[in-house]
Amino acid sequence: MIRTRATYSNCSELPLYNFIKIVVYDRLESLYSEKKYMFLKEADLEAVWQSIYEEYNSLSGNSKHNHIFSLVREIAVLSHRLQVIQSAIDFLSTDFDEKVCQLLRKMGFKFNYKPDTMARDLKLTVSTAKQLLIKKQDAEKELNDLNKDSQKITEKEYNAQITRISKYMGFKINPKETSVLDFVNYQEAYYQDSKIK
C-alpha cells in the first residue's frame, strides 16, 4: 500500500538539528521523520514547514515573523482568488454557465451575469477585482521590505546560542536529541533569568 512518507508535524517532535538545517540551508527534506522507501509518496513539505514555523514563532513570541507569515498567507489567498476570478472571466467571455456566474456572486461580485449584460458585467468584475490586485501588490511590497531588513541567522550563530544556553542550563544540549519546543523553553528560561539580573 502506498502512503505518504512520515514527517515531523510540530515543534515537540522536530529535532533542533533538523530545524537549524531547514532555517539556515532551506533543507526541507529534514522534515522527514523516516527514511525514503520505494513505495512512499513525498509529503507537501512547504505546508508542513509553514505550520511548524508558525508554531515556532508563536512559541517564541516573534511578532515580526508572525506578521511575515500572515502576509504570506494573505498573498496566497489573494493570488488564488485572482486566479479563480480570471479563469471565470475567461470562461464567461466565450461561454455561459450559471454555476460560474454563481461562483462570482459568492465571491462578492453582485452583478447580473446574464447573456445580454455579460460584457458589461465582466468589465465591472475586472475593475472591482483590481482592488484585490492592489491589495496583493501592497502585501507583496510590505513582505519584500520586511525581508530586506531581516538577516538570515547562520549555523555558527545557532551553535553559539546553543552553547550559551547549555552553559546556563548546566548540561550540554544535543541538537539531534533536543526538540525545538524544548529549546524554545530553555531560551525562554535563559532570557527571563537574564532580565532579572
Image (cartoon, rainbow, N blue to C red):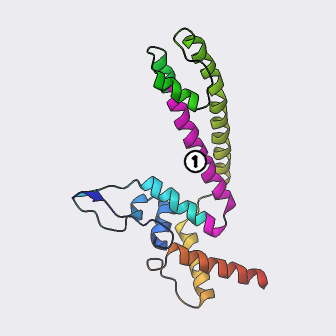
Secondary structure of the residue carrying tag 1 is helix
The vertical placement of 103 against 189, above or below, is above
Quadrant of the image occupied by residue 36: bottom left
Q: Residue at x 65, y 49 (%)?
A: 148
Residue 190: give x, y in percent of width and height. 66, 81
The vertical placement of 189 against 50, above or below, is below
The vertical placement of 75 against 25, above or below, is above
Q: What secondary structure do most residues of the magenta stretch adopt?
A: helix
Quadrant of the image occupied by residue 91: top left
**Badge 1 amino acid:** Arg
Please tell me whether residue 54 belongs to the stretch shown in magenta.
no
**Quadrant the C terminus occupies:** bottom right
Please tell me whether residue 81 belongs to the stretch shown in magenta.
yes
Residue 116: give x, y in percent of width and height. 54, 8
Residue segment shown in magenta: 58-86
Q: Nearer the viewer, residue 118 or 8?
A: 118
Q: Nearer the viewer, residue 27 or 42?
A: 42
Q: Residue at x 47, y 62 (%)?
A: 22
Q: Which residue corresponds to mark 1?
A: 73
Q: Nearer the viewer, residue 58 or 101?
A: 101
Q: Residue at x 57, y 32 (%)?
A: 106
